[in-house]
Image (cartoon, rainbow, N blue to C red):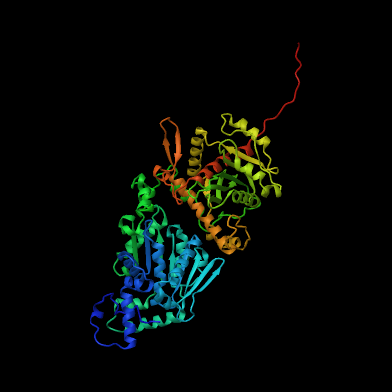
Amino acid sequence: MITFDPTSSNNVYSNEKFKQLDGFLSIEDARVSLAEFLFNNLGLTVELLFNLKIFPFQEIILRSWFDHNFCLNVWGRGGSKTWLCAVFCCLYPIFYPRTRIVLASNAFRSTRRLIQQIERFINAKEADLLRQCYYEKKGKLEFVRRADEMTLDINEGQIIAIPLNEKVRGTRGDILVVDEFLMVPEDIYKSVLMPFLTARNDIQEQLELEELKENLMITDDLSEEDLALAKSTKKIIGLTSASYDFEFVYRLYLNWIEKATKQGISRSYFVSRIGYQALPEKLIDKEIVEEAKSGGENTASFQREYMAIFSSSSDGYFNIRKLHEFTVKEGDLPCVQLKGSPDAKYVLAIDPSLSDSGSSDFFAMGVYLLNPDHRSITQVHTYARTGTGADLNGHIRYLYYLLSSFNIVMIIGDFGGGNFNFITACNESNYFVERNIKLSFVDGDFDSEDYLEQLRVARSSYNLSGKRICYTQKFQHIEWIRKSNEHLKTQIEMGKVYFASKLTGHEERFKRAIETEIPIIFQDKIDFEKGILDFIADQDDLIEQTKRQLALIEPKVTSGGTMQFDLPQHLRRSKSIGRARKDNYSCILMGSWIAKTYFDMSTQIDEPVYNSFEPILI
């Protein structure tokens, strides 16, 4: 191991001193000089150790991450920020042995992918020199997997991947890397992330630093570099795309820019914002960018995703600010649920898609908690799979999982071209037959002009114990599309539609969830411990995706004078697997509507029936 002091005041990131070297050096001086040279030239270091060439801007970013404590990086798609972060995590422990790096994200699989990229870098066939830096003693990487943690022993230190929840509070480390920083709520940042940076890891080391600082204070040549040695070397590196200007990450972005330009503390803060135009041409996929901006570069979604520009408001019909406002606060209840409360009632909305294409619409389902006292709903569980993610049997088994885990009192589904084929397929499947489950439909047509009469018809045929709880919604009814969207918009603005808080943000419920053996029935081949965390991460993420789908919806009047509600034209054109979709929006649209009818059915007063006989004269 090459050892030197990277915090020494002699390091000014200049190669002038190396030009002056002459003659022979001792082995120790040669090692130190080489280490200093590699530290001063990170681009060359990456090329030597990884056998990879990086772009000049990437070397600048790496240098900034090395030199600053608070780093926020707002980049557009295609910037390879996660890839570069993996390079950093491999490099930093070489110069700072015994470093503990904590990787955290709301979606645990994101941090797991990051640590796996680190492993790939070290194990790459061409990275012989990098591998020697880590394999000198044990000869292999110590890679440990647990239910909600992955650990990699690296150069007498550790890299730990964990979900972004209260677990961070009890984790000790020197560097915290947070992926998808825009998903971090303000209270989590203040109560969890900031204490992480101020918590002391090594008391003995802190005492030595305090003693050093006292010794330095009595000297006459005290420099900024000397003081930097005495202060904390902890770091936080946030990676994110742009979001909306009312969200916390934008306020933090402005705050850190102000601090980065303030004299005296500027060395502690670093902020970068990089859109696709600033990236080297070889780094971005031109076809994807051109397809994305086919609707114009002035669209809010394109500016956020690719240009790293924060949006002032939503371009859509539904106000993203309201959707954000009526999301349950992190750590509060109700949070995302994997199993429902026995005494609660839920409605289920289904937007089926039986295509086997990976670029198809989602087969989507949404579970909504009913609050009869306020006639409101809360989205607590979501399902969204493409044709490559699950087949028909997978959808059927997932529906059974929802029916057995939630007290579902009504089911509404897209009419689907003549009959609700998915429910028929469920009833005829061996999975339902073996479990003696058969779903059937209530009578009545809630699109009818005589709505109250249809409520009476539906109420008389409704049977919860007999599973006669299904209703088919005809999306071909243009008038219903207008009314249902107006109804949902009104419900959102009146605070009648809520979105559950993240399960990962509620420590007690999260621990209970990962200890509960919930079958990941659409991921049979995936290890259970890995699957349950992916399952939770999916649920937390799908709540956010639903809100963002709502924010993208825009109304349009056709040439025939009818109102349509759809994604922007440039998003509809995309045929890629990762294209924008609106199927979870369709579910919440139907869920809000069927909740309204269920509340109306429950409160409707039956008119008394009078049986009488009136004789008439013939």
Question: Height in image: 460 above or below 552?
Answer: above
- The percent position of residue 46, horizontal first and vertical second, equals 35, 71
Q: Is residue 223 left or right of residue 339?
A: left
- The quadrant of the picture occupied by the C terminus is top right
Question: Height in image: 545 above or below 264?
Answer: above
Question: Height in image: 523 above or below 56?
Answer: above
- The percent position of residue 441, horizontal first and vertical second, equals 64, 38
Q: Nearer the viewer, residue 176 or 575?
A: 575
Residue 446 appears in the figure: yes
- The percent position of residue 62, horizontal first and vertical second, equals 35, 68
Q: Nearer the viewer, residue 464 or 343?
A: 464
How many marks are shown on the rendered structure? 0
Q: Residue furthest front?
A: 125
Quarter-wise, where is residue 117 in the image?
A: bottom left
- The percent position of residue 119, horizontal first and vertical second, equals 46, 70
Q: Nearer the viewer, residue 409 or 420?
A: 420
Q: Is residue 600 left or right of residue 611?
A: left
Q: Is residue 435 left or right of residue 233?
A: right
Residue 268 appears in the figure: no
Q: Residue furthest top?
A: 618
Q: Is residue 613 left or right of residue 472?
A: right
- The quadrant of the picture occupied by the N terminus is bottom left
